[in-house]
Image (cartoon, grey):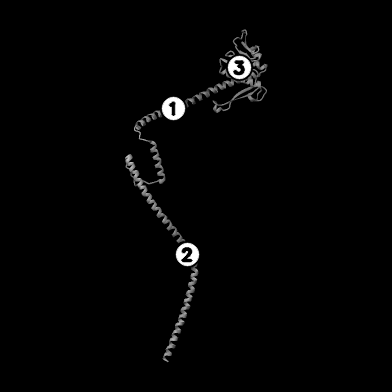
Amino acid sequence: EDEEQQNISKIEKISKEIEVLKVVIKETQEEISQYLQKKETFAPQEAEYSKKIEEKKIQIETLEKEFGELQNLIYNKKLNIQSLEYEKEKIKDYLKQVYNIEFEVLPQDIVIEALSVCLEKRETLKKKIDNLGEVNLVAVEEFEELSKRQNFLNQQKQDLISSKEELKKAILKINRTSKEIFLETFRKIEEEFKNNFRFLFGGGRASLILLDPENVLESGVEIEVQPPGKKLQNVSLLSGGEKALTAIALIFAIFKIKPSPLCVLDEIDAPLDEANVDRFTHLLKQFAKISQFLVITHNKKTMSCADILYGVTMQEKGVSKLVSVKFAETKNAEEKTQPIEST
């Protein structure tokens, strides 16, 4: 009985422990459910962190690769530095032995050019040194001689510059004087031209116009005329006889201002009619007082004004002969003309 009682006590005790364990299991299951819910909540963050971890791993691998490359580059640079140091020492020895120059790189010097540029400059300087050739022992004397030559040439250059400036001033003065003389002569010629034109045409008016008044020394001249009963027009629009009369008026106007001891007129009266020839011969007689005229003409009225006639004839075929006739002196013997007849 005691044993049975003990067993019953044990059973009751175990039953109570089972109930307690059931409660604990239930609570634990609830906690597990809560943890599972929290896990689902943290799942996106877990995925995001996993992704970041993978990216960081890739970055780490890249950095490790770059680090390895930098280590290799540093190693190569060290080798280059050693090579350059060796080359520098060779250059220093060469400068000391050949040119007796102590070369030293100052610590404050800053390299501002790439090595390739320096090497290229070095090659250029080497070529220049080679082109210089051997040392010229008379270089000082040659330099002094060339310096004297340069000073002489500089002095000559300065003299030329001074002469150039003086010539410019002279040209300006000549141009100014020429312009004044030209304008004065032009006005006189224009006035005489107007008088001659009115006489030859029996009226009308004419003028000489400068095409470029601002640059008279290089300006062209245009002739505008207005014969009696016609509109003002350019000389190129006149008839042949009118052009000839206008040209005669201009020629005699120029001849009046700037006379010449001899004047040759070749068929100048060919386009003129009888009345205009009379006016022409009248002018010719007036100007014959101050100069001699050789007139080549076929006009009888023009010939009648001459003191001496020269003609060419052909009495025999293929043989030309010069014939001259001298007229008797008249009361107007001072009017001298010498027309020539061409046949």
Residue located at (39% from left, 51% from top): 77
Q: Name the residue under label 3.
A: 265
Outermost residue toward the bottom in this view: 1
Q: Residues within 10 Å of mark 2 (few under 14, many from 20)?
A: few
Q: What residue lies at 47% left-to-right and 26% top-to-bottom? A: 167
Residue beneath disc 2 = 50
Judged from the image, the secondary structure of the residue bearing numbered disc 3 is strand
> Is 26 in front, or is 126?
126
The amino acid marked with disc number 3 is Leu
Mark 3 or mark 1, earlier in chain: 1
Q: Which mark's residue is nearer the viewer, 2 or 1?
A: 2
Residue type beneath disc 2: Ser
Quadrant that contains the C terminus = top right
In-front residue for pair 289/159: 159
**Residue that mark 1 sits on:** 160
For the residues labelled 2 and 1, say whether their Cβ atoms are less than 8 Å apart. Answer: no
Proximity of marks 2 and 3: CB atoms separated by less than 8 Å: no
Q: Is the N terminus in the top left, top right, bottom left or bottom right quadrant?
A: bottom left
- Residue type at numbered disc 1: Leu
